[in-house]
């Protein structure tokens, strides 16, 4: 079996490994069909993901077909098309007991802390696999994991029908948040520095787009919201300055959602938080969002709509990483195709 491994930072290899086998009664053997390349895979490759350890088989945006099941598997059968829920957790710590296993103190993410899905086949317990309508195209369902990131951010923001939401950044994560916020019935204002990304956001339902390199975001947002400010600000740029802007612009009683891993501090005083009684929340990975996203996919309520801009066969994975690295402006989402 072939597998894509990052042995150490700035190296990428295709290895020949032994075929994985079912060991536990709840295990499922999956033949991989598509794996999305995510910013965090690029960070692992570049050595800039503080959470990753090496050597590592990358890939956490994974879709495949079930080829064998353990004796006690109940919810997945041979032939099912499945998407991977990439989190493994203890089930006992405070976060797990609170129903928030995505921030488990011993969280292990498939493709980050443990070997992931960029290989011809893998074994995972059935609870980490979600069957999807098998008539859906692989290129539609491989987006399930990034959609769950969007769903989580919208849930953490408490976005409701009729809210005005400001999403900063129209990268893949901003687009996933946009799709979920629109399904929730929100009016969405979205920013970016690139016209092409804003055009794609518009095609995906953004009500207003703002080019932050050409227009003052704050003035425009206040004008659009009649001076009230957006009710929810979701930061998918994740810079110290975009966090600051979010707290400045959010409406009274509003919520600011951050998704970043940037360790640099933001300069935010207590005043706007107290005066407007702002809620500031983090959003990491997802909890219980796969069920929702799978239903939306099955009902054709979320569609890729041109999201996957590039496909590479497994043999060209190095070229794929190089292409994504050198052409960030051209790539919406690149996927590795397994046959
Ligand atoms: N918390 C989580 O679970 C989670 C999961 C995935 C990604 N992330 C984070 O989300 C962020 C976005 O991910 P992505 O893959 O979409 O990244 P990306 O780099 O592809 O997209 C960021 C976008 O922001 C735009 N941008 C840059 N500066 C801007 C500014 N000042 N104003 C407006 N737009 C600006 C860029 O042009 C780009 O289109 C990253 O920081 C990533 O680490 C968090
Ligand atoms: Zn990802
Ligand atoms: Zn736990």
Image (cartoon, rainbow, N blue to C red):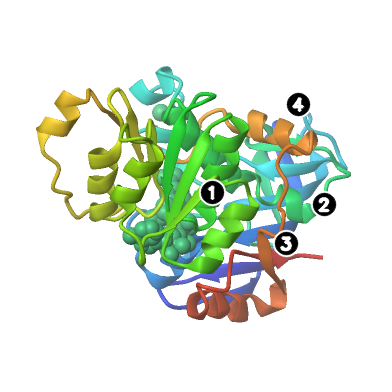
Task: Give above or below for 102 relative to 196.
Answer: above
User: Badge 4: how crowded within 10 Å, few (<14), some, or many (20+)?
Assistant: few
Q: Which mark is residue 328?
A: none
> 231 and 101: which one is in front?
231
**Which corner quadrant holds the N terminus?**
bottom right
| Mark toward the start of the polypeptide (2 vs 1) | 1
> Which residue carries the number 4 mark?
72
Q: Which mark is residue 137?
A: 2
Give ligand 3's quarter of the image.
Answer: top left
- Which mark lies nearer to you, 2 or 3? 2
Circles 2 and 4 in contact, beta carbons < 8 Å: no
Q: Secondary structure at mark 1?
A: loop
Which residue sits at x=72%, y=54%? 305
- Which mark lies nearer to you, 3 or 4? 3
Which residue sits at x=46%, y=49%? 190
- Which mark lies nearer to you, 2 or 4? 2
> What is the distance, in whole Å, between disc 4 and disc 1 at their CAs?
22 Å
- Which mark lies nearer to you, 4 or 1? 1
Circles 2 and 3 in contact, beta carbons < 8 Å: no
x then y, percent, for residue 248: 23, 41
> Which residue carries the number 1 mark?
110
x then y, percent, for residue 120: 73, 61
x then y, percent, for residue 55: 46, 65
Which residue sits at x=45%, y=33%? 164
Q: Secondary structure at mark 3?
A: loop
User: Badge 2: how crowded within 10 Å, few (<14), some, or many (20+)?
Assistant: few
> What is the distance, in whole Å, between disc 2 and disc 1 at their CAs?
23 Å
């Amino acid at each position: 079996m072939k597998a894509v491994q990052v042995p150490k930072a700035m190296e990428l290899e295709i290895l020949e490994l032994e075929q994985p086998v079912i060991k536990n009664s709840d295990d499922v053997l999956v033949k991989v069909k598509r794996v999305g390349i995510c910013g965090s895979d690029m960070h692992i490759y570049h050595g800039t993901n503080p959470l990753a350890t090496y050597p590592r088989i990358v890939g956490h945006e994974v879709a495949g077909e079930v080829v064998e099941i353990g004796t006690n598997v109940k919810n997945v059968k041979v032939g099912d098309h499945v998407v991977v829920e990439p989190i493994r957790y203890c089930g006992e710590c405070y976060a797990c007991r609170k129903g928030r296993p995505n921030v488990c103190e011993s969280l292990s993410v498939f493709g980050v802390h443990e070997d992931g899905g960029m290989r011809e086949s893998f074994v995972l317990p059935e609870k980490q696999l979600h069957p999807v309508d098998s008539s859906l195209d692989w290129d539609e369902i491989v987006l399930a994991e990034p959609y769950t990131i969007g769903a989580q951010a919208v849930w953490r923001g408490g976005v409701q029908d009729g809210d005005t939401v400001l999403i900063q950044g129209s990268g893949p994560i901003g687009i996933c948040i946009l799709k979920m916020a629109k399904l929730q019935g929100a009016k969405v204002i979205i920013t970016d520095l690139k016209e092409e990304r804003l055009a794609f956001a518009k095609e995906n339902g953004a009500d207003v787009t703002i080019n932050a390199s050409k227009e003052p975001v704050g003035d425009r947002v206040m004008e659009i919201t009649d001076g009230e400010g957006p009710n929810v600000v979701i930061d998918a740029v994740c810079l110290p300055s975009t966090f600051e802007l979010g707290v400045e612009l959010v409406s009274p009683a509003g919520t600011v959602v951050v998704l970043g891993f940037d360790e640099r501090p933001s300069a935010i005083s207590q005043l706007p938080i107290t005066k407007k009684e702002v809620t500031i929340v983090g959003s990491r990975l997802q909890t219980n969002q796969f069920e929702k996203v799978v239903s939306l996919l099955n009902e054709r309520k979320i569609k890729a709509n041109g999201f996957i801009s590039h496909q590479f066969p497994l043999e060209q994975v190095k070229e794929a990483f190089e292409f994504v690295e050198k052409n960030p402006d051209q790539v919406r989402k690149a996927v590795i195709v397994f046959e």
